Amino acid sequence: MPEGHTIHRLAQDCAARFAHGAPLTVRSPQGKFADSAALLDGSPLQTAEAHGKHLFLGFRDGDWVHIHLGLFGKVTFGDAPAPPPTDTVRLRLADAASYLDLRGPTTCALITDAEKAALHGRLGPDPLRPDADPAAAYARVRRSRTTIAALLMDQKVIAGVGNVYRAEVLFRHGIDPYRQGRDITPAEWDALWSDLVELMREGVRNNRIDTVRPEHTPEAMGRPPRRDDHGGEVYVYRRAALPCHVCATEVRTAGLAARNLFWCPTCQAGAGR
């Protein structure tokens, strides 16, 4: 599932291509969004924004297309002329210069301002949004007996963090992923939050996740670059049984909250399992 930086990048790309005031052709070749597409057809896109893993495309009169890609959703952009769409395209936006195709989302729905506000209200603060309040997230963390690794993945606590950022930010701060939320100090939380802000902003800029510090890059260490479909240089994510870049201890993995957790039992003190 895409992490929050990917959705924020999509919002930027949608705005850059389509939020110019010109009317858009809106279609649903698959048919599942056909009625809503007909209502929006000929409307200009006014804005695009993201909150966590949710994308919102704003049209006239407070109409919003709410998109959640889920595990299989994909957005592709192209230059005009757009090719004939396949019947897997849930939503196509097009103008004289560009087109967008959305396939396989968990959610693609036309919602109102009030429904959008309710969605925001159910989500935790997003490190990439200017309105984010890290204190609100910490208020939930510090009352919880749940592990910090699980809390970071809980979109009601903090929105946009996925499995990669979760594993990497805990490694970067030497925090045992199995520590309870209530044991995370204010100073540790501030450091985690600030690091997520910077890492995720870089993810938006580069459209990929890189988390290793300059002294641990392939060039600095004389090691081969990472070869992985997920891209980016990381410390522990999907590196189970490989040596830690910092201490050479074997990276471990285990299931936690239906996802694979990765950590270094030496660098993340007390994380031995």
Image (tube, rainbow, N blue to C red):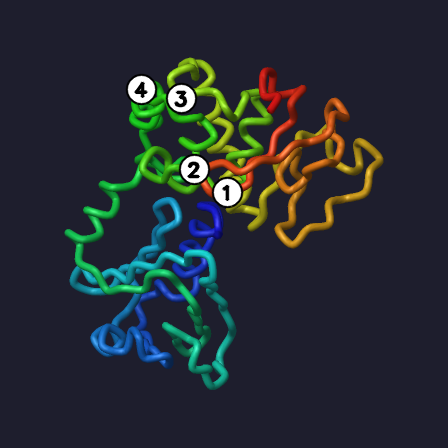
Left or right placement of residue 179 versus residue 236 in this view? left
Q: Name the residue under label 3.
A: 181
Q: Disc 2 and disc 1: Cα gap in Å? A: 10 Å
Q: Nearer the viewer, residue 143 or 252?
A: 252
Say which mark, if any, is on residue 259: 1
- Give the total of numbered labels: 4
Nearer the observer, disc 3 or disc 1? 1
Q: Is mark 3 on a helix, strand or loop?
A: helix
Residue type, numbered disc 1: Arg
Circles 2, 1 touching at the beta carbon (< 8 Å): yes
The vertical placement of 11 against 157, above or below, is below
Residue at x 18%, y 53% (from the top left corner): 115
Q: What element carries label 4?
A: loop
Q: Is residue 248 above or below residue 71?
A: above
- Where residue 159 appears, as percent x and y from the top left, is 37, 40
Residue topped by disc 2:
153
**Is tag 2's residue or tag 1's residue first in the polypeptide sequence?**
2
Residue sitting at 65 percent across and 49 percent down?
231
Front position in the image: 91 or 20: 91
Residue at mark 4: 143
- Choose the circle earlier in sequence order: 4 or 3: 4
Marking on residue 42: none
What is the spatial separation of the Cα atoms under label 3 and label 2, in whole angstroms?
12 Å
SS under mark 1 = strand
Q: Residues within 10 Å of mark 2 (few under 14, many from 20)?
A: many
The C terminus sits in image quarter: top right
- Looking at this view, name the residue that lies furthest to the right: 222
Residue type for callout 4: Arg
Report if the CB atoms under discs 4 and 3 are less than 8 Å apart: yes
Tell whether 249 sits left or right of 155: right
Circle 3 packing at 10 Å, graded few (<14), some (14-19), many (20+), is many
Between discs 3 and 2, the one toward the N terminus: 2
